[in-house]
Image (spheres, grey):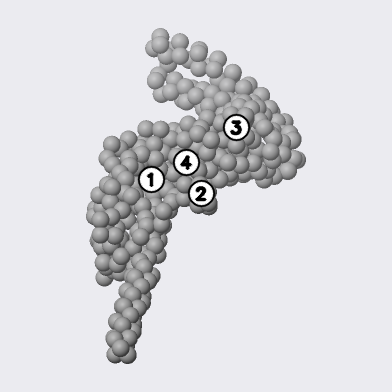
Amino acid sequence: MISGKITKLLVLLVIVTAAACSNKQTDQQYESIKYVKTEKITSVSKGDKLVFNGTIKERNLTTLSFRVGGPLTNLTVKPGDFVEKGQVIASIDKRDYRLQVESTRTQYAQLKGEYGRYKELFNDDKIPANSFEKIESGYLMAKTAFENAENQLLDTDLISPFNGYIHEKMVENFQTVSPGMPIVSLIDISKLEVEISIPENQLLQIKNSTNNYLTVKNAGVSDHPLNIVSISEKTGKDGMFRMKLDFDNDQSLNISPGMSAEVTMICNNSKTGISIPSSAVFRDKNNNCVWIYNNSTKTLAKRNITLGNFTNHGKIEVVSGLRSNEIIITAGVNNLFEGQTVKPIEKPSYSNVGGLL
């Protein structure tokens, strides 16, 4: 009878031990399953929208100077003043230039009369050609001197060539200036420009852009139309092409040169492509790779991919290696291994915040 009890105890001990081992294996298997963040691949329009940062600049910045010299008598503008096209910005003392006009006018009038009389005699063959040529030469010299004196008198006024603002004043009133000496610099803001830098691999896309828009956050301006002005023929030292775009300025826009801007370009490109979070990419033996999640086996497989350009919101273009509807791992990719069993992290329901229901 004792032997029978011992046998039952041994059988019971074996069952308990087996159950404990089974539970331990289940716990270990459960603990080996890692939770991962996943994303399903979708194809989107490729290159439809490109965004660049730039800086607002004036269309023209012109330094104005006199073509004649003398003391200034009417320089009253200051930096920031608005001037209209044709407005006198500064003047030079006209006294000597008026005297020069009167002197050359008298000589010109005298020689003009002589030229008329000698021309009639020459036409009637009453004087030789060489005599007439001397009179004609003197007349033309006097005429040129008179016209030059008149032009110099006109040049004593410095005229604004366009509507704009005084940017800098280089001299002071009553100062004696020489021809070509900078007087003021004038900026034309009837049109403003924004300059952006373009990488080589996006140049062709941009040349096919159909609509371009400007956003200046500090001025409260968004989606203002832009026109392409020029694209540089070669890259700068940074390996980037320079593009200039302009727009008609309106005082209601409150945009000023020097402001930071954002340019959005809508490109005419019917191709589609795939973009994935850059956090999904890892390097293995000089290859760019991602982890593909198999929904049937719940395991991972490594896939080599070819990358393109960075796009918006931290994503990068995939040229080859991925297809639509495949599932990739987007976080912690360097801590995973081939064939590993994982479980996707379920996205919380918007109607069950915190999973309380």
Where is mark 3, residue-wise? 253
Cα separation, mark 4 vs mark 2, equals 46 Å
Q: Nearer the viewer, residue 18 or 209?
A: 18
Q: Quadrant of residue 252?
A: top right
Q: Position of residue 58 (x, y in %)?
A: 55, 39
Q: Which structural element holds mark 3?
A: helix
Cα separation, mark 1 vs mark 3, equals 28 Å
The disc, 2 or 3, on the residue closer to the chain's N-terminal end is 3
Task: Please name which of the two marks, 2 or 1, marks the residue nearer to the observer.
Answer: 2
Examine the rendering and report whether any part of residue 35 can be seen: yes
Where is mark 1, residue-wise? 232
Where does the N terminus fall, quadrant-wise? Answer: bottom left
Task: Please name which of the two marks, 1 or 3, marks the residue nearer to the observer.
Answer: 3
Q: Are marks 2 and 3 in contact (CB under 8 Å)?
A: no
Cα separation, mark 2 vs mark 3, equals 51 Å
The residue lying at 50 percent from left, 17 percent from top is 115
Q: Are marks 1 and 3 in contact (CB under 8 Å)?
A: no
Q: Are marks 1 and 4 in contact (CB under 8 Å)?
A: no
Report the amino acid beneath label 1.
Answer: Ser
The residue lying at 40 percent from left, 19 percent from top is 128
Q: Position of residue 99 (x, y in %)?
A: 69, 28
The disc, 1 or 3, on the residue closer to the chain's N-terminal end is 1
Where is mark 2, residue-wise? 357
The disc, 1 or 4, on the residue closer to the chain's N-terminal end is 1
Task: Please name which of the two marks, 2 or 3, marks the residue nearer to the observer.
Answer: 2
